[in-house]
Image (cartoon, helix red, strand yellow):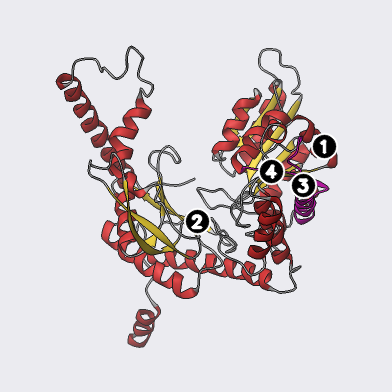
């Protein structure tokens, strides 16, 4: 859990309160001045109404230039950001023809496959010529090619499971699979900070959902024991099925899941384990096989393994890996497989080719070099940020590093000041995070050179001093330490 300093929490609450008060004040005078009913509605009720609309109008639109920035090049270590301007106080943004070359600290390009690759790109182009850009069909009709079968076999072998099934979108992989795996009279126990796709999938399943404290195995065991003892609501009958859902690396925290302890508890209480490896597969582990490899967990102990291809493989889509019986069942019942368009053939080829590079099947050791580099880059960058005094979340080896901002005024300040110095960062605030826990999320890539990282650290340090987000004392530099030693 994040321990917010009392003064920081107080000033953050005050800032949001001030924004809310001024927003309500302006809305009141807006109603007084424009009292007549809008002619545009023609008798319809406003389609956007309530606190969500208020938040967008009075808070989000003020800083929307910090979000949704368009780019005009591949999301490599450096990319081109299209400049925008607004003539109506940020209500609408207008693109210009100018671009700015920026250091990319926001894309999920963990292994650098999103840019042109000497092995992957030619094969993706050949596949585009052979199969076209889309199958224009679902998997159960005309959307399954030999390439899709090869991809599923390749993924299953890579993650260490008997079989796998792939989908065209990572978000849908969670939100469409969970209602198929479990329904009414079933129990889902979910980590409190699981991704929105898991939350929506759990809600859509109709199962009873209980939450345990983030990454806390002891509380998971408490919840499991309580729910098993109590049984289903009203009837108190035993649950038909229990699934515990966790993530390998939590996307907003950068923390590694305590998988060995969680699996031990699930085995003890006969609950299934569902592991979302969207941010960990390909990025961590000696050979890129995710948190199971990193933490020494046998993939056979994880009942359902989920992952996406958008982070480490430079493509799109997601997968579910498990037993042959499970995968066959999903092929018969999952709406995303039956009704959704299959993965684009060039995207499928990109995934297959990138896995071959990771495993060294391209005849080189580039895959091993990429894995070593992402680990070195991540640990170096995290260590340096912490030495500077920033509050950085997450664990070593994780390429995701959130820098806590807290105050709403510091969200646009950090983003805009970094962009002025040609560093593109992603800032995250409510509703993606709790109201008080706004942050900048840094994503490190194997394509970043040491010079890139040093430049980024210099810019972030200067901006941190400017807006006051170094919440801890900085460590003295080596030169200062040496001088002190000499004086002593």
In the displayed structure, does residue 54 sit left or right of residue 170? left
Residue 360 occupies which quadrant of the picture? bottom right
In the displayed structure, does residue 301 sit left or right of residue 117? right
Name the residue that disc number 2 marks.
107
Q: CA distance from mark 1 to mark 4?
A: 22 Å
Is residue 389 among the parts visible in the rendering? no
Tell me the residue at 40%/79% (across/down).
478
Seen from the viewer's position, the closer of residues 148 and 59 is 148
Q: Quick check: 434 above or below 278?
A: above
Tell me the residue at 40%/67% (across/down).
456
Q: Position of residue 298 (x, y in %)?
A: 78, 53
Residues under numbered marks 3 and 4 in contact, where contact means CB atoms less than 8 Å apart: yes
Q: Quick check: 457 above or below 331?
A: below
Is residue 426 among the parts visible in the rendering? yes
Which quadrant: the C terminus? bottom left
Name the residue that disc number 4 marks.
135
Residues under numbered marks 4 and 2 in contact, where contact means CB atoms less than 8 Å apart: no
Q: Earlier in the sequence, mark 2 or mark 3?
A: 2
| Residue 328 numbered mark, or none | 1
Q: CA distance from mark 4 to mark 2?
A: 27 Å
Name the residue that disc number 3 marks.
145
Secondary structure under tag 4 reads loop
Q: CA distance from mark 2 to mark 3?
A: 30 Å
Q: CA distance from mark 1 to mark 3?
A: 17 Å
Does 119 appear in magenta? no
């Amino acid at each position: 859990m994040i321990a917010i300093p009392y003064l920081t929490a107080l000033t953050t609450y005050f800032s949001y309160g001030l924004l809310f008060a001024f927003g309500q004040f302006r809305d009141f005078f807006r109603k007084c001045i424009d009292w007549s009913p809008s002619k545009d509605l023609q008798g319809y009720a406003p389609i956007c109404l309530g606190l969500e609309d208020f938040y967008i109008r009075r808070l989000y639109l003020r800083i929307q230039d910090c979000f949704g920035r368009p780019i005009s090049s591949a999301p490599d270590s450096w990319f081109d950001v299209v400049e925008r301007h607004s003539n109506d106080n940020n209500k609408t943004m207008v693109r210009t023809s100018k671009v700015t070359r920026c250091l990319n600290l926001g894309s999920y390009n963990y292994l650098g496959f999103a840019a042109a690759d000497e092995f992957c790109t030619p094969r993706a182009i050949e596949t585009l010529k052979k199969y076209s850009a889309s199958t224009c069909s679902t998997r159960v009709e005309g959307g399954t090619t030999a390439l899709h079968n090869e991809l599923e076999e390749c993924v299953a072998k890579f993650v260490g499971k008997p079989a796998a099934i792939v989908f065209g979108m990572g978000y849908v992989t969670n939100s469409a699979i969970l209602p198929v795996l479990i329904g009414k009279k079933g129990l889902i126990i979910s980590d409190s900070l699981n991704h929105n796709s898991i939350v929506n999938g759990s809600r859509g399943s109709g199962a009873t959902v209980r939450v345990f404290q983030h990454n806390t195995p002891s509380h998971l065991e408490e919840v499991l024991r309580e729910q098993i003892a109590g049984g289903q609501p009203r009837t108190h009958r035993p649950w038909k099925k229990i699934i515990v859902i966790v993530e390998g690396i939590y996307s907003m925290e950068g923390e590694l899941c305590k998988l060995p302890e969680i699996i031990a508890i699930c085995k003890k209480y006969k609950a299934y384990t569902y592991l979302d490896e969207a941010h960990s597969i390909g990025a961590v582990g000696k050979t890129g096989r995710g948190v199971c490899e990193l933490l020494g967990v046998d993939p056979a102990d994880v009942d359902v393994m989920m992952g996406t291809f958008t982070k480490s493989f430079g493509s799109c889509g997601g997968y579910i890996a498990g037993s042959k019986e499970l995968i066959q069942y999903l092929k018969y019942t999952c709406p995303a497989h039956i009704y959704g368009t299959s993965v684009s053939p060039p995207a499928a080829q990109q995934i297959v080719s990138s896995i071959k590079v990771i495993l060294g099947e391209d005849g080189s050791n580039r895959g091993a070099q990429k894995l070593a580099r992402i680990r070195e880059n991540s640990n170096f960058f995290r260590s340096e940020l912490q030495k500077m005094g920033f509050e950085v979340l997450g664990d070593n080896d994780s390429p995701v590093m959130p820098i806590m901002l807290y105050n709403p005024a510091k969200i646009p300040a950090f983003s805009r000041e970094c962009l002025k110095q040609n560093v593109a960062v992603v800032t995250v605030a409510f509703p993606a995070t709790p109201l008080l826990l706004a942050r900048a999320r840094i994503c490190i890539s194997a394509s970043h050179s040491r010079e890139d990282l040093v430049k980024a650290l210099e810019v972030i340090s200067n901006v941190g001093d400017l807006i006051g987000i170094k919440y801890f004392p900085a460590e003295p530099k080596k030169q200062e330490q040496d001088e002190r030693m000499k004086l002593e």
